[in-house]
Image (cartoon, grey):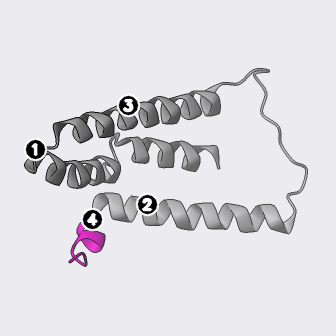
Amino acid sequence: MGAALGFAALTLAGFPPAIIGLVTKYIVLRPVLDEDHTWLAVVMATNVMLGLAYYLRLVAVLVDKPNGEAYVSPSPPVSVRVAKATVILGASGLVALSVWPDLLLSNLP
């Protein structure tokens, strides 16, 4: 589940292989620059950098193993299996939209 969370965080930050986060930032930032609102573009870029720092910190915490041993539950309850299935479905949708962003962007006005 940590791998899916890490993948989602990197996607939101705009890192490959899923670059939908980068495409979204470009789509939002482009009209602001076209209208010569430079100050707003600087504010948006600052917010992107703050978000990037947050996402990378989250991934660093996911990767860190303080004891060197991972906790393994003897038998996961039903709620954990449902949560894992939800994460797998969400990650699959995230991968699909990252590989084929036209699935989402073609329906925009």
Distance from disc 1 to disc 4, alpha carbons, whole Å, reads 31 Å
Q: Secondary structure at mark 2?
A: helix
Q: Secondary structure at mark 1?
A: loop
Label 3 crowding class (10 Å Cα cut-off): few <14, some 14-19, many 20+?
few
Label 4 crowding class (10 Å Cα cut-off): few <14, some 14-19, many 20+?
few
Q: Amino acid at mark 4?
A: Trp
Distance from disc 3 to disc 4, alpha carbons, whole Å, reads 26 Å
Q: Give residue 36's mark.
A: 1
List the residue tagged with mark 4.
100
Q: Earlier in the sequence, mark 3 or mark 1?
A: 1
**First to last magenta residue range:** 101-109
List the residue tagged with mark 2.
94
The residue at 75%/22% (across/down) is 68
Front of the two marks 1 and 4: 1
The residue at 25%/41% (across/down) is 40
Distance from disc 1 to disc 2, alpha carbons, whole Å, reads 33 Å
